[in-house]
Image (cartoon, rainbow, N blue to C red):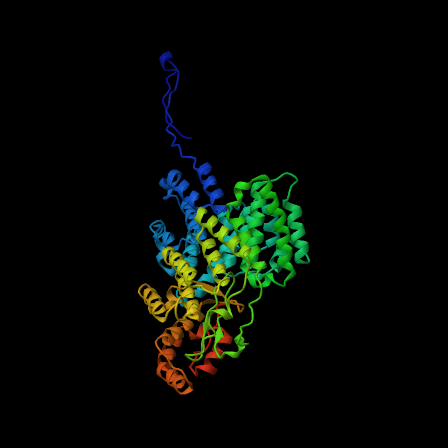
Amino acid sequence: MDFDAVHDPSDPAKKDVIFKLSIPIEEDFQPDLGEFCRLRRLGRFGDADKHFQQCLKHLTGVPYVLVQYCEMLLASGSYNSFRTVSYRYKYPSLVSEESVKDPCLDMLEGNFWLLDLLAKVPQPYFDGDIFEAIKRILGKLETESAMGSTEVHSVTQRVKEHYRKVFDWNKLYHRLLAENRIWDLRDLLVAGGSLFGSQFFSQCLNASTFPKALDQLYEDWIQPEYDESTALALLDLFTSILIDSPSSLQDDPKPRLLLEYSESLVESIQTHDPSNMKSRPFIQWIIAKSISEMGDIPERPDGLRLRDFSGTVIRPGRGIHLPVYIPAKPWDNPHWDMFSVRSSPQQRQSLHVALQAARYIGDYRLQAMCLKLLILHTQEPKVLMESLQSLQWEQGDNEGFLETCLSKYLAVSGENGTTREDLISDFKKIDNILPGNLTQILPVVYNSNSFCEPKASLLWARDVVKALLTDHAADEDEGNRFLQVNINFWNGRLTEYGSRLPHYLINHIRKEFRAEIPPQIKGPL
């Protein structure tokens, strides 16, 4: 510290030198932010938002605080609320795709940018820029001496954006273990497991098999004394993985192992802290358990099976989805009973309990999961589908709303069912808010060939089903007329997204619709 003073030793009255310091005092918001993050981790989004508005709202100008709030909104499925958050004034460069090529890209700026990416789709021409930013930021994180939760979130967001071999995952695992950061580990393993499967577990824990990795994880983190954070984080980790791949719960031994570990955690939580039964990890356990107990779809009285129809089912991505069927002929609709499962009253009651708990904590994502499972458990899905659509519409889940519209086509029937007029009205509703080229608004996914693509399958399903709703062809001749009338329109639409369709759907379109498909786009990697 430098200061100027004059001292006269001949004057006894001036033998002291006095100076004043003015030191700014900064508010310590970490305790309030820590409580907010704890509530967010538990999935108690209503309480988290209330706490933020009371204690942290005045700090929204602090990017580190605001990014936590944005993550909470996306985690809860509140897309409309996320889109209203004004953070771009802090980072004007976010309005331009050129920002990702900036070598000085700030870590928080990159986090905001990737959150924005998860809420909407970027234009196809800057896919390569995304991957360049991912590679550069992962390289920067490799040399970070201090890695906090924000940095770990950056890693996990970039894992979701698809990168595998640029990072020493085992080194990061031991770093998180030494610092007792179980929730950050949960983020990492969920993101990596979603993308790379169970081998990511083995890679992180340097284990030869998945069961050994799971044993090591338990041995490293579970202590003799109950710890709320560890129990809930591990339960959240295991159930997130289970829900991410619901189709494997029936016959894959790995999910069965996760279920067994989850059951011991559930018992511990019920014994030591029953209040946490109303938390996201616990509700996810009810959902995962329900999926594991789902029976097979019964045979129809007429003996028909799905393979007897000429249409195709859209292969869903990860997570829980409603079936979307694209008929190849106007009369070729297998209807809802080809997809609904039979369940006991106890199974349905468990899902209703989970739904009420998800509503209580304000978790819109879990509400949607519960409604989808309840829909799959009923032969009369109209009311539940309308409830799901209402939730998706209110929260701005455009992709989910479109998927539910398409699934409702299977439930089109006479009295007490969805009518064609109902579905036409639904499509008009979504057409009013979506641009003509839907690739601009649907989220992106990553396929097994390691490149970024919009969910073009839903776009094709939408164009076909909309045409089918206004056509009443009943025989082969009328079916050929239907194809001839619509083929030019479909060819035009396929120029927008056809190059991003999966191979199985391209083959089906060429065979059944005789449409022209543009060459597939090569990915940047």
Counting from the top left corner in percent of width and height, residue 204 is at 61, 54
Q: In which quarter of the image is residue 116?
A: bottom left
Which residue is nearer to you in this view: 476 or 153?
476
On the question of residue 179 being in view, the answer is no
Q: Which residue lies furthest to the top in this view?
A: 12
Left-right relation of 306 to 392: right
On the question of residue 403 being in view, the answer is yes
Tally the numbered discs: 0
Counting from the top left corner in percent of width and height, residue 284 is at 53, 52
Q: Which residue lies furthest to the left in this view?
A: 432
Q: Where 229 sits versus 389, above or below?
A: above
| Residue drawn at (59%, 54%) of the image | 169
Q: Where 161 sits versus 482, above or below?
A: above
Counting from the top left corner in percent of width and height, residue 333 is at 45, 75
Q: Where 421 sits versus 162, above or below?
A: below
Left-right relation of 337 to 79: right
Which residue is nearer to you in this view: 365 or 33?
365
Counting from the top left corner in percent of width and height, residue 389 is at 39, 60
Which residue is nearer to you in this view: 65 or 215?
215
Image quarter of the N terminus: top left
